[in-house]
Image (cartoon, rainbow, N blue to C red):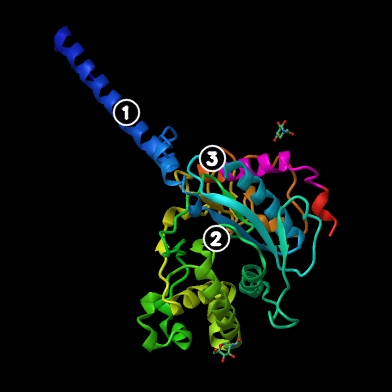
């Protein structure tokens, strides 16, 4: 601080006080922002508790999965965190089912509540395994006893990071808007399955089937249409080529629109590291993107980082326990993800051995 020599002592003191006052105010402001971004850890839960006391708001967590080791280790972590947040204030979670669409039991039957369904008939999936998801839902909804009125469609690479309330509103379901699902920009293709007489192409939401919280009765109507649209999209070369690995997401968006269903779009449903930097008040960590950083904590996306966490590094078996934490400077969302994976793998019995058997 530069204080001119000819200033009197009183003046100097006054200036010093003013500067201190300013610094203090700035500090308060900055901590307010930080607290806000961190999701206001001290926020009282009372309001949410009131909202969730009604039991018919509960949703069933439905996780579609296969018996591949890659799917199994993710399901184990997912189920571990479901159990941790299920009964926390603010959660409307009901029971949990892994809908296993490999057609036969696997070694996780005792660990995770599981319902086995058939895969699509031989050859119909054309090697695109996720086409089995809609068919899995059709069978499960038809055959299983589900006590909750709502269901959450979830995927193995989801981790519940905050207690998740029922985000649906009556018969209006809630979904997550994906930046890469763009019905309007693909009007020509969408129109093959959502003809003009059905309505504007903006009826088709920019979502996939997961995460979605929806009334069970509504899903029973949509699921068979979703199977039909996925198969027809897969059969249409132009659509198959354009939509690629997100085809079954578009198929759900179109199928629900065909039933006149619009979703509440909730950006806070999920966060996707490394792009989303803070967990805040969001509900699910979706770890579909690789997280690659150099040792200075800078993102090197698309280039293998000196430090990395990428689910695809563990295609054949589970990640080891106690993964190293990222270097300083890496966003909180990534640190949180790795800590949550580590906590799960430290506590799940037989982590290293169980799902290497298949
Ligand atoms: C989808 O439904 C349409 C009309 O109901 C039907 O003609 C078609 O065969 C179905 N396609 C598939 C692949 O199931
Ligand atoms: C986890 O790894 C760190 C080093 O990366 C080590 O210091 C720590 O003791 C390990 N913890 C456990 C439980 O193995």
Can you give x and y, in whole percent of width and height, for residue 229 in the image? 55, 82
* Residue 355 forms part of the magenta stretch: no
Q: Which residue is mark 3?
A: 88
Dot 2 surroundings within 10 Å: few (below 14), some, or many (20 or more)?
many
Residue depth check, mark 2 versus mark 1: number of the one nearer the observer: 2
Mark 2 sits near ligand 1, with its Cβ under 8 Å away: no
Q: Are marks 1 and 3 in contact (CB under 8 Å)?
A: no
Horizontal side, residue 333 vs residue 11: left or right: right
Q: Which residue is mark 1?
A: 28
Can you give x and y, in whole percent of width and height, for residue 203 in the image? 38, 75
270, above or below 145, in the image? above
Q: Main secondary structure of the magenta part?
A: helix
Give the residue displayed 35% in from the left and 37% down from the top: 33
Horizontal side, residue 287 vs residue 317: left or right: left
Mark count: 3
- Disc 2 versus disc 1: distance between alpha carbons? 42 Å
What is the quadrant of residue 46 in the picture? Answer: top left
Q: Secondary structure at mark 3?
A: loop
* Residue 347 forms part of the magenta stretch: yes
In the depicted view, which residue is nearer to us: 85 or 141?
141
Q: Which residue is mark 2?
A: 151
Q: Earlier in the sequence, mark 3 or mark 2?
A: 3
Q: Which residues are magenta?
A: 335-352
Quadrant of the snapshot with the N terminus: top left
Give the residue displayed 33% in from the left and 28% down from the top: 27
In the depicted view, which residue is nearer to us: 175 or 267?
175
Mark 1 sits near ligand 2, with its Cβ under 8 Å away: no
271, above or below 234, in the image? above
């Amino acid at each position: 601080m530069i204080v001119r020599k000819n200033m009197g002592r009183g003046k100097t003191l006054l200036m010093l006080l003013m500067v201190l006052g300013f610094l203090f105010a700035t500090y308060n402001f900055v901590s307010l922002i930080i607290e806000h971004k961190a999701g206001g850890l001290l926020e009282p839960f009372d309001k949410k508790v009131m909202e969730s006391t009604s039991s018919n708001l509960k949703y069933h967590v439905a996780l579609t999965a296969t018996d591949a080791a890659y799917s199994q280790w993710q399901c184990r972590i997912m189920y571990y965190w479901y159990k941790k947040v299920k009964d926390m204030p603010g959660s409307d979670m009901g029971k949990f089912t892994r809908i296993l669409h490999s057609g036969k039991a696997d070694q996780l039957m005792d660990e995770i509540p599981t319902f086995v369904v058939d895969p699509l008939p031989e050859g119909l999936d054309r090697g695109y395994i996720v086409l089995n998801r809609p068919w899995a839902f059709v069978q499960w909804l038809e055959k299983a006893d589900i006590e909750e009125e709502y269901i959450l469609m979830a995927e193995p690479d989801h981790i519940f990071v905050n207690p998740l309330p029922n985000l649906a509103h009556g018969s209006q379901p809630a979904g997550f808007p994906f930046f890469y699902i763009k019905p309007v920009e693909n009007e020509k293709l969408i129109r093959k399955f959502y003809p003009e007489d059905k309505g504007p192409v903006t009826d088709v939401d920019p979502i996939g089937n997961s995460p979605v919280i929806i009334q069970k009765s509504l899903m029973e109507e949509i699921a068979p249409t979703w199977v039909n649209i996925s198969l027809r999209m897969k059969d249409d070369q132009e659509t198959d080529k354009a939509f690629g690995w997100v085809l079954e997401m578009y198929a759900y968006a179109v199928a629900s629109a065909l039933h006149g269903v619009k979703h509440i779009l909730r950006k806070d449903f999920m966060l996707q590291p490394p792009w989303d930097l803070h967990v805040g008040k969001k509900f699910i960590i979706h770890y579909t993107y690789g997280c690659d950083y150099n040792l200075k904590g800078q993102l090197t996306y698309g280039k293998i980082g000196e430090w990395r966490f990428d689910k695809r590094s563990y295609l054949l078996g589970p990640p080891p326990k106690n993964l190293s934490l990222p270097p300083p400077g890496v966003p909180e969302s990534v640190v949180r993800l790795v800590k949550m994976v580590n906590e799960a793998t430290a506590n799940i019995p037989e982590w290293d051995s169980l799902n290497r058997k298949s």
